Amino acid sequence: MATRNTIQRQVVLSAVKDLRNHPTSEEVYSYIKPKFPSISLGTVYRNLNMLSETNEIRKISANDNAVRFDIVLEDHHHFQCKECGSLLDVFMDYDYNINDGLEKKHHFKIDSCDVLLSGICEDCLLKEVSC
Ligand SMILES: [Zn+2]
Ligand SMILES: [Zn+2]
């Protein structure tokens, strides 16, 4: 049975899927709002957190300190552009031997790795060249 809560959850999940660009809760809210005017930012935020707790989406934080949500669940890293702030996915083979080395050195138990690279994106580099 689809309760009001499950419907809201589905709406929020599909918004993150549609947006794809690591939206913040505000961005998800503005996307949903025209279609579901009765939904509040608090509801959107609560659903985003529930979805990340059940691992249907990932919660990530970037250099701007905004909490963002990611629909890509497989291991990957991010690159944030210092000019335009866009957050891009970076897929690279992660060397799990690094974990072993760090665990031995620091006595950690590492269970995930989320690298945030920063610099200037391709679009912004092209803009600089044409100016
Ligand atoms: Zn850029
Ligand atoms: Zn991502």
Image (cartoon, grey):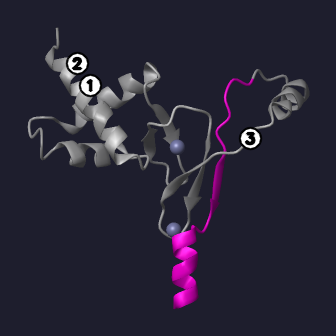
Relative image position of residue 82 (x, y in whole percent) = 56, 66
Please identify the quarter of the rendering in which residue 38 is found.
top left
Helix or strand or loop: what does disc 3 sit on? loop
Identified by mark 3, the residue type is: Asp
Report if the CB atoms under discs 3 and 2 are less than 8 Å apart.
no
Report if the CB atoms under discs 1 and 2 are less than 8 Å apart.
yes
The range drawn in magenta is 110-131
The extreme bottom residue here reads 131
Helix or strand or loop: what does disc 1 sit on? helix
Relative image position of residue 130 (x, y in whole percent) = 53, 89
Relative image position of residue 102 (x, y in whole percent) = 85, 31
- Determine which residue is flagged by label 2: 6
- Determine which residue is flagged by label 3: 93
- Determine which residue is flagged by label 1: 9
Left or right placement of residue 55 versus residue 9 in this view: right
The structure residue drawn at horizontal position 23% and vertical position 47%, both measured from the top left corner, is 31
The extreme left residue here reads 38
Left or right placement of residue 9 versus residue 85 in this view: left
Left or right placement of residue 25 versus residue 21 in this view: left
The structure residue drawn at horizontal position 84% and vertical position 35%, both measured from the top left corner, is 98
Residue 1 counted in the magenta span: no
Classify mark 3 as within 8 Å of ligand 2 or not, answering yes or no: no
Q: CA distance from mark 1 to mark 2?
A: 5 Å
Identified by mark 1, the residue type is: Arg
The structure residue drawn at horizontal position 48% and vertical position 59%, both measured from the top left corner, is 86
Q: CA distance from mark 3 to mark 1?
A: 33 Å
Kindly report which numbered mark, 3 or 2, lies closer to the viewer in this rendering: 3
Identified by mark 2, the residue type is: Thr
The numbered disc on residue 73 is none
Residue 118 counted in the magenta span: yes
Q: Earlier in the sequence, mark 3 or mark 2?
A: 2
